[in-house]
């Protein structure tokens, strides 16, 4: 194999191997564990940067092994894959730093970081998968490696949350498997192809293809938290904050949304799917999810639960962008993959900081939090404005492209959905900001930890501040080369609507 | 190199080595552990030698004493036999490693000779080429297995062993009557000769019915599984592992051979019936496993369900023989590794906490991480999630089902997988939590934990080995030779 074939493998291995070593480490080997974690994350980032440069200049990174008769395990770095890989690699580094600070002194850290690394390896595998079977394998691996993180605390509540998570995801996985097998028996091929690989099938297969589409979307929809398959997400909030960040921004939810993008563009091909008439229901489903998630978020007093319902709503922007059918809306959807990740992880980091530093879990307890923790709440404010869609934060760019794309495709109703969602976002985020900045703090916080002159530990403060800057940067410098937006346009030009 | 390796008579070695070792253990009990360990280290080497020969020169034949087929005893091995031998050697190694840490003095004396005789009988069965030899080895396996079930002593174990004894004798008897009918009708018991001579006729029909019924009873296919859960759950952990992983596979292997070589042209209706029972087994076994409150019984019912999967292939074979039978062999092999790992892990849980009640598992994941990990990895294969041997087998079987539009079979497989996830995560979930009744833990020897882990890792690794696995299976082409096409 040439060097170029090794790079995607190394990207997966750079978190897999440290993870396996970490499992074997004794609990008190803190330094070695931290070093391994950071080494793996940095190495991955360097490799991803190498691939970004290479793919931009037309290099081809592909690794391939025999898996089953007629099927290979394929890891391939195309522009779309890299968008997701880059997001995961960057956020993994930050989340690792955050988790090191967050879990300091708590038990079972070797187990935690071991599964944490496995989880990211699976995500990177999902991103780089070059065919549907590889995708399915890493997708299931993701389910398995996140379960121990969800039940990490070992309480009865955590166990039940893990059970709910599994019931949803294993069910989705089964549908996905069945759909994949069915597709394979029809086409004899599962390689992701620009404009899809099912086009060659005659019209007599249309009903079967519609069923397969529904199965695959349902399978991915579970993780992407499409209504009515979203029930696990708010319940999984019992997990520690870094896990929530991982679920919502880096890995799980994203893998689902990414799967939907793959199915529409690289399995069916968007024109073919539109011809089948399956895109309209998908667009409606996404729209319903966006509104429903926002409405449910309004009524949550628990901060993390409110954020969870917000995720349900926001991730469906990606699906919506794809389902509108049109290059501009697709740019909006694909770029939201990155933008939502940056903004949502900021919010979850901040929620974790509030809980760890002040013992604040509920929105009603947040009065005056901005005065006690100005940096944290500043980052939170950036994330919240991004979600609402206010310029110059990245969320604005997504919504702008989605709106333009909808108009271009002649689907004016989407604008109403976007506007309604923005209003609802404002309705559930602005009261939080008002409490934090303009109300007086209480005499005593529920459970305050003292960090001396700093507002909290640096490992907890640095990640949200960095991601908040990135979210603003992605909005302000949207037209600079290698910005998420420019890369999303590259994806759409080269892979989806290219020659 | 090739001349030397190919010249050694690997077949007799594989049978005589454990036989001699078993006798040694019986005569000199104090040497048992060492002899056992040495034997299970040498057996995989012998299997590797046989594999070398098979891959270099094709199907292996050995005429014992130089007499040859109609008169003497023929040993033979094709790709299917080789895989079964490899499965036995691998599981045997893991279980032996475990057993050296498990048994107390009294039980140990009886366990080692029995286990090594069982190993010899299993190897002999997979190397046999005629129906009567198969009967003899099957009977040896049955008797050794029953005796091992009763090792524990006590009421539960004896009741379980008694039921098992009756079932296994009845099964062998039915099989033997079928053999007699075929011998009477066609004048030979050699599989190769029978394959050429048997035509659909009343005699063949009667033989098919009797032999299938007997073997199905011994394989514990629903609704003839009644003897399995008590026997497998009450036996000592290493014995449970051997019974579930290997012993039920022996009778299934004979059924598969008969089917591939003799009965395939005449068995349409029976294939449908076996498939139906297989489907019922998957659902019923999984449902029972979900309802169990003790780990060992849960794992035993899981075996009932997993055996069902093997029979789902029979109705699919008519259209897609190669895919369906490959799937079956893959599933059988992966199940052997995974189920052995699970029973060993369950044994560790009992050893550790003194019980195996699911809800009272007390933070096992922290305290026995290797055992919990082994159970989880084995569970991945049992559920059929990737990457694992179980996934590969399930994928192939699903492919055969969907391609022929057998949505009922595909549906049963998927539902069975979901239920398996249900019962496996029921156990895993409770390994994270604290129990209401804390128990006094006693330490588990490291080798017992590692033995379970090695087997579980084997089941996972199988997920990456499909190309060589299927290449070995194609040696001698037992599947295509059955006239089933692809």
Image (cartoon, coloured by chain):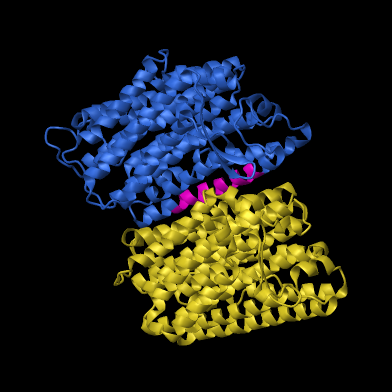
Task: Specify the farthest residue to the right.
Answer: B201
What percent of the width, then of the height, locates residue A416? 53, 22
Residue A281 vs B283, above or below: the answer is above
Which segment is the magenta one?
A: A163-181
Q: Residue at horizontal 79%, vertical 69%?
A: B193
Report the label total. 0
Task: Specify the farthest residue to the top.
Answer: A479
Report if residue B283 is visible in the image.
no
Locate residue A106 relative to residue B72 in the image: left or right.
Answer: left
Locate residue A3 relative to residue B210 in the image: left or right.
Answer: left
Residue B226 vs A442, above or below: the answer is below
Quadrant in the rendering for residue B27: bottom left
Q: For residue A127: magenta?
A: no
What percent of the width, then of the height, locates residue A68? 61, 45
What percent of the width, then of the height, locates residue A295? 46, 34
Pick the residue in front: B486 or A15.
Answer: B486
Task: Specify the farthest residue to the left.
Answer: A452
Can you tell which chain is drawn blue?
A
Pick the residue in front: B377 or B407.
Answer: B377
Report if residue B174 is visible in the image.
yes
Locate residue A299 relative to residue B382 in the image: left or right.
Answer: left
Q: Colour of chain B?
A: yellow
What percent of the width, then of the height, locates residue B105? 36, 82
Locate residue B472 relative to residue A481 in the image: left or right.
Answer: right
- Main SS category, magenta section: helix
Q: Residue at horizontal 54%, vertical 82%?
A: B160
């Amino acid at each position: 194999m040439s060097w170029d074939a090794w790079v995607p493998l190394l990207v997966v291995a750079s978190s897999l191997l440290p993870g396996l070593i970490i499992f074997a480490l004794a609990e008190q080997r803190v330094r070695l564990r931290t070093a391994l974690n950071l080494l793996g994350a940095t190495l991955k980032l360097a490799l991803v940067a190498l691939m970004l440069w290479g793919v931009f200049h037309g290099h081809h990174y592909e690794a391939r092994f025999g898996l089953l008769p007629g099927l290979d395990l394929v890891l391939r770095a195309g522009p779309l894959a890299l968008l997701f890989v880059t997001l995961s690699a960057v956020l993994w580094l930050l989340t690792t730093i955050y988790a090191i600070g967050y879990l300091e002194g708590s038990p079972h850290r070797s187990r935690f970081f071991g599964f944490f690394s496995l989880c990211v390896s699976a995500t990177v595998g999902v991103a780089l998968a070059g065919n549907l079977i590889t995708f399915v394998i890493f997708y299931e691996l993701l389910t398995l490696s996140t379960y121990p993180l969800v039940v990490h605390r070992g309480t009865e509540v955590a166990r039940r949350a893990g059970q709910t998570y599994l019931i949803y995801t294993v069910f989705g996985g089964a549908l996905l498997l069945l759909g994949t097998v069915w597709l394979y028996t029809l086409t004899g091929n599962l390689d992701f192809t620009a404009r899809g690989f099912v086009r060659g099938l005659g019209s007599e297969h249309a009903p079967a293809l519609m069923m397969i589409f529904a199965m695959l979307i349902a399978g991915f929809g579970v993780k992407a938290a499409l209504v009515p398959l979203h029930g696990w997400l708010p319940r999984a909030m019992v997990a520690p904050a870094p896990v929530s960040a991982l679920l919502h921004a880096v890995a799980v939810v994203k893998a689902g949304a990414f799967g939907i993008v793959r199915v529409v563009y690289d399995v069916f091909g968007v024109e073919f799917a539109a011809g089948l008439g399956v895109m309209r229901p998908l667009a409606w489903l996404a729209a319903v999810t966006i509104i429903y998630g926002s409405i449910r978020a309004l009524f949550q007093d628990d901060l993390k639960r409110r954020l969870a319902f917000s995720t349900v709503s926001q991730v469906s922007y990606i699906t919506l962008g794809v389902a509108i059918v049109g290059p501009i809306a697709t740019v909006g959807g694909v770029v939201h993959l990155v933008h939502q990740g940056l903004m949502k992880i900021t919010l979850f980091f901040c929620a974790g900081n509030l809980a760890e530093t002040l013992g604040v879990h509920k929105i009603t307890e947040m009065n005056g939090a901005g005065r006690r923790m100005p940096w944290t709440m500043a980052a939170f404010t950036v994330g919240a404005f991004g979600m609402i869609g206010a310029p110059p934060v990245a969320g604005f760019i997504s919504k702008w492209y989605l709106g333009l794309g909808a108009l271009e495709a002649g689907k004016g109703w989407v604008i109403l959905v976007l506007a309604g969602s923005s209003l609802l976002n404002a309705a559930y985020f602005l009261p939080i900001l008002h409490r934090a900045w303009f109300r007086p703090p209480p005499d005593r916080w529920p459970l305050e930890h003292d960090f001396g002159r700093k507002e909290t530990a640096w490992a907890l403060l640095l990640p949200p501040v960095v991601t908040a800057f990135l979210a603003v940067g992605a909005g302000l410098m949207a037209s600079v080369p290698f910005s998420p937006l420019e890369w999303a346009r590259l994806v759409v030009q080269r892979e989806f609507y290219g020659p | 190199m090739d001349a030397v390796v190919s010249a050694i008579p690997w077949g007799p070695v594989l049978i005589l080595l454990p036989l001699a070792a078993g006798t040694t253990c019986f005569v000199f009990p104090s040497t048992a552990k060492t002899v056992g360990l040495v034997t299970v280290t040498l057996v995989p080497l012998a299997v590797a030698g046989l594999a070398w020969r098979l891959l270099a020169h094709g199907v292996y034949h050995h005429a014992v004493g130089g007499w040859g087929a109609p008169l003497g005893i023929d040993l033979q091995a094709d790709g299917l036999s080789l895989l079964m031998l490899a499965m036995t050697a691998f599981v045997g190694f893991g279980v032996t490693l475990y057993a050296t840490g498990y048994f107390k003095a009294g039980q140990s004396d009886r366990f080692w000779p029995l286990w090594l005789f069982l190993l010899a009988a299993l190897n002999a069965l997979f190397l046999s080429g005629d129906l009567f030899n198969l009967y003899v080895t099957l009977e040896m396996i049955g008797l050794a297995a029953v005796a091992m079930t009763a090792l524990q002593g006590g009421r539960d174990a004896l009741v379980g062993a008694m039921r098992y004894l009756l079932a296994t004798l009845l099964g062998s008897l039915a099989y033997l009557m079928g053999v007699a009918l075929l011998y009477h009708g066609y004048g030979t018991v050699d599989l190769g000769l029978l394959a050429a001579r048997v035509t659909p006729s009343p005699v063949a029909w009667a033989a098919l019915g009797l032999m299938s019924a007997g073997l199905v009873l011994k394989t514990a296919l629903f609704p003839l599984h009644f003897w399995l859960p008590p026997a497998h759950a009450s036996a000592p952990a290493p014995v449970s592992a051997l019974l579930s992983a290997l012993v039920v596979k022996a009778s299934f292997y004979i059924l598969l051979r008969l089917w591939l070589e003799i009965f395939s042209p005449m068995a349409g209706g029976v294939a449908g019936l076996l498939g139906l029972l297989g489907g019922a087994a998957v659902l019923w076994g999984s449902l029972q496993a979900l309802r169990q409150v003790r780990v060992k019984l849960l794992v035993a019912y899981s075996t009932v369900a997993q055996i069902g999967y093997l029979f789902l292939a029979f109705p699919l074979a008519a259209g897609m023989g190669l895919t369906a039978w490959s799937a079956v062999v893959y599933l059988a092999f992966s199940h052997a590794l995974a189920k052995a790992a699970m029973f060993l892990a369950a044994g560790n849980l009992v050893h550790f906490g003194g019980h195996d009640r699911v809800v009272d598992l007390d933070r096992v994941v922290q305290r026995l991480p290797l055992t919990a990990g082994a159970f989880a990895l084995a569970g991945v294969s049992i559920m059929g999630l990737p990457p694992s041997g179980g996934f590969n087998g399930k994928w192939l079987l699903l492919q055969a089902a969907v391609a022929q539009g057998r949505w009922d079979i595909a549906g049963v497989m998927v539902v069975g997988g979901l239920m398996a996830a249900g019962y496996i995560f029921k156990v895993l979930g409770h390994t994270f939590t604290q129990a209401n009744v804390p128990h006094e833990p006693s330490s588990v020897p490291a080798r017992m934990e590692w033995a379970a882990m090695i087997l579980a890792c084997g089941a996972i690794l199988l997920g990456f080995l499909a190309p060589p696995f299927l290449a070995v299976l194609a040696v001698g082409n037992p599947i295509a030779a059955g006239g089933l096409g692809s």
